[in-house]
Image (tube, helix red, strand yellow):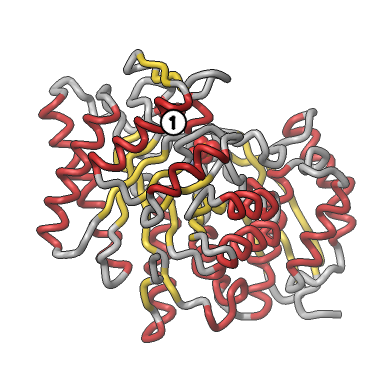
Amino acid sequence: MPEASISDLWIRRVYTGRGDVTLEVEVYTEGGYGRAAAPAGASRGKYEVRYLPDGGIEEALSNFEKLVAPELLGMDAAEQAAVDMRLAEIDGTEDFSRIGGAAAIATSMAVARAAATALGMPLYYHLGGALARNVPYPLGNVIGGGKHSRGLGPDVQEILVVPVGADDIYTALDINVRIHRDVLSEILKTDPSFTGGKNDEGAWTPRVSSETALKIVQSVAKAVQREVGAEVRIGVDMAASSLWDGEKYVYRNEGVARGVREQLEYVKALIDRYDLYYVEDPFHEEDFNSFAELCDMYEDRLIVGDDLFVTNAERISIGARMGAATGVIIKPDQRGTLTGAYEAARMAVSRGLTPIASHRSGDTEYELLAHVAVGFGTPIIKAGIMGGERTAKLNELLRIWDDLGRAARMARLR
Ligand code: PGA
Ligand code: ZN
């Protein structure tokens, strides 16, 4: 019997920090134990795996007990790829619509955690081996809108910062927290009635336009950069599939609708005006062509596909062939297994694209994403700045940094 042979599994409903019902799985092995829960998105991509089966959470629970648990008993938790392949076989569909992506990813992650404890090694090491020693730069949203603010904030979903000049993870997180804190007083100068509301991802959510939000974040980022003496860059997640109505990009709060060409011009203007380093989903999830056109003009920026690629190696390969992106969001739950997410990250790297490990807007107190980022070697992690489900991952990066000791270093950016 292998050391990490699975001896018992358990599933229950739990909640994300936003209150979405989700699934948590526990895995017991001969020498170890692991537990993990699936996060939940709000601006989900059309091509992600299905979060729950048609019968919802009840069907996911009963399918796990009837179909999944009996099949995994006795398997070696250390054989992640074999476990993940078995999950896909049990499900039997292309998109996990039978057992649900939430149960699949919670199981896959709990198995990895159990194997690491059984083998007596840190999870990042179990996932990435001796090469897993690069700690990612934290990319976090400071002001947010879109679906994460129920349409009440700016139209652009996220205004982000990344401290690319930080020499260590302690400094990097300090910079992001300072920017988040200092942005409040700038917002109050523009809107004295702002009550300090934050959205699903812990970003401030004032009633200001996207460009006002960008101006505020840009000026505070510059000030903190001067104070700390490390370069800070800014970015956006436009989550453009949420704006797209089938014909135009509708900016509700601005009262503007932009056609395909106008959207391209608008994105270019934002990149130039605010010197954006990072631009996620500037076009809707089918429009590889506009992505490619933008990328052509801004090869030195991170033009990143989230809903475009949905952590799917095949879509990434198509996008890479078209020159549609320079970066790829890696959300393990979009794919349903850690192995699937790993393949997506490998595909990105092999085609010269930067993988970025990412949380979801409805996330949990689990820290596992930090291990995924270090283990898979993603040079950036997108995990917010404020809120317990965000700091769970960010604080874990500090622990990993300390655990690595003298081997620790910040990842290399393009
Ligand atoms: P989510 O989206 O709400 O689906 O998690 C976050 C994102 O667009 O990056
Ligand atoms: Zn996104």
Residue 205 vertical placement versus 310 (above, below):
above
Quick one: quadrant of the N terminus? bottom right
Seen from the viewer's position, the closer of residues 377 and 34 is 377
Seen from the viewer's position, the closer of residues 321 and 17 is 321
Q: Disc 1 residue type?
A: His
Residue drawn at x 89%, y 56% is 70
Q: Can you identify the residue that label 1 sits on?
A: 148
Seen from the viewer's position, the closer of residues 374 and 244 is 244
* Count of marks, rendered view: 1
Is residue 4 in sight in this rendering?
yes
Whether residue 54 sits left or right of residue 407 in the image: it is: right
Percent x, y of residue 107: 72, 55
Residue drawn at x 21%, y 48% is 179
Residue drawn at x 57%, y 40% is 288
Whether residue 178 sits left or right of residue 104 in the image: it is: left
Residue drawn at x 62%, y 75% is 126
Is residue 37 in sight in this rendering?
no
Quarter of the image for residue 339 reads bottom right
Quick one: quadrant of the C terminus? bottom left
Using a 10 Å C-alpha cutoff, classify the residue at mark 1 as few (fewer than 14 neighbours), some (14 to 19) or many (20 or more). Answer: many
Quarter of the image for residue 40 reads top right
- Mark 1 Cβ inside 8 Å of ligand 1: yes
Seen from the viewer's position, the closer of residues 95 and 398 is 95
Whether residue 378 sits left or right of residue 229 in the image: it is: right
Percent x, y of residue 355: 51, 59
Q: Secondary structure at mark 1?
A: helix
Percent x, y of residue 139: 37, 53
Percent x, y of residue 302: 41, 53
Residue 343 vertical placement versus 200 (above, below):
below
Extreme-bottom residue of the structure: 406
Residue 369 vertical placement versus 118 (above, below):
above
